[in-house]
Amino acid sequence: MFPIQLEEKTRGWLAVLAVTLGIFSLMTSELLPVGLLTPIGEALDVSAGTAGLMVTVPGLVAGLTAPLLTVRGAAVDRRLMLAWLVGLMAAANLICALAPHFAVVLAARVVIGVSVGGFSAIAGGLAARLVPPQQAGAATAVIFGGVSTASVLGVPAGTLIGEVAGWRGGFAAVGVLGLTALAGLLLLVPRLPSQKTINFADLSALLRTNMGVRVGVVVTVLLISGHFAAYTFVRPLLHDLAGLDDSLIGAVLMLYGLAGIAGNFVAGHRVSRQLSGTLLLIAATLAAATALFALAAAGPLTGTVLLVVWGLAYGGVSVTLQTWMLRAAPDMTESASSLFVAAFNLSIAFGALVGGLTADQSATVGVLWVACGLTLVAALTVAVRNKQTL
């Protein structure tokens, strides 16, 4: 039974939208510091590299938590588990908004990592239980669209709020968004008792025996690590390298977000027919955009154009990689999703960490060359795999 009685033809999709809002709020929470890195660092008296730990820590925790909660929480009703995780995230963001010291913020970010990892791994397999079988593919795309939309739109929106209300206001706004998502889950999603138990041996066996899954994990690590090595520091890059005034950065990041949404739809349309080609194009474009940014971002206009191209390419990453993983293991979708979420979030942490070390040890422009190198290797990996299957 649904907490609210609705027409059967609409209640399933409302539940899908509630889960999508939950994953959007969680991913926005994970990535929010990207757009607020400079003001947070200045207010709490830490370097840019140290402030980057706000992205590294939850990514690392989420990557470790995704398979752990999938296995250990197998017997728990999925609706209650999702609601608990979103509520935990909302509380952690409100703590960040009030935190007097950086250590408090970092501790709250650990909690956010737990929420992101558990929610993302579980949400990936719910679409088929919420809508009719013939609509499950579309529902899955909508749910994972929350990930890409948060990456490309949630962060710019949080940045704009931070510019108007201060960085604490940005955290508070995401906390309120989390509470809204919590209400949606409790009111619109039905009871979802666990249907299948997964153990760690299943995950290990899938990774060990399935070449497609292994390639998907490797490409995920390369693409996401490369992206976040540079994107974590996009604010200082836009200010120092492209010469953008701080008052314009939020608007430019919003353009990046809009381009990313377009990229998500374009990639979603292409992957059913040209999966490998779409992934290769995305990786190559990311490599080219970051290299050109390092070489040619001599002014605000050039920097803005290159960031928009960057956003257009990255917008298609989540839906393309998720489709790759599910297609590689169609009979083990929850296990494949768990491995994807773990690789995705660990790569956010690794990329932000490498970017932080690079930014602290050399010029900030170095993070762009790290991103270019990793995404170029991703493109070569997809090209080799595609050639082997022809």
Image (spheres, rainbow, N blue to C red):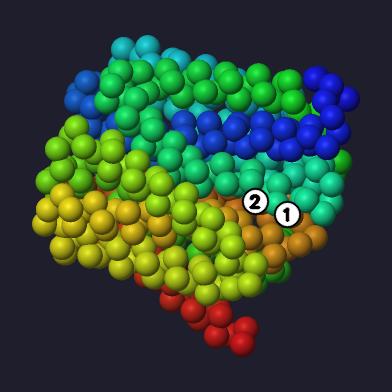
Q: Picture quarter containing residue 224?
A: bottom left
Whether the residues at callouts 1 and 2 have beta carbons within 8 Å, the answer is yes
Distance of label 1 from label 2 (alpha carbons): 6 Å
Identified by mark 1, the residue type is Gly
Residue found 22% across the figure and 65% down from its top: 292
Residue found 61% across the figure and 25% down from its top: 181
Left/right of residue 331 with respect to residue 182 in the rendered view = right
On the image, numbered disc 1 is attached to which residue? Answer: 137
Left/right of residue 224 with respect to residue 199 in the rendered view = left
9 lies above or below 46? below
Identified by mark 2, the residue type is Ala
Comparing 142 with 43, the one in front is 142
Q: Position of residue 169 (x, y in %)?
A: 35, 18
Q: Picture quarter containing residue 85?
A: top right
On the image, numbered disc 2 is attached to which residue? Answer: 141
388 lies above or below 349? below
Residue found 58% across the figure and 36% down from its top: 23
Q: Position of residue 44 (x, y in %)?
A: 24, 21
Please, what secondary structure does the residue beneath circle 2 have?
helix
Residue found 55% across the figure and 78% down from its top: 385
Q: Residues within 10 Å of mark 1 (few under 14, many from 20)?
A: few
Please, what secondary structure does the residue beneath circle 1 have?
helix
Q: Quadrant of the C terminus?
A: bottom right
Q: Which mark is residue 357?
A: none
Could one spot residue 92 in this view of the protein? no
Count of labels in the image: 2
Comparing 389 with 137, the one in front is 137
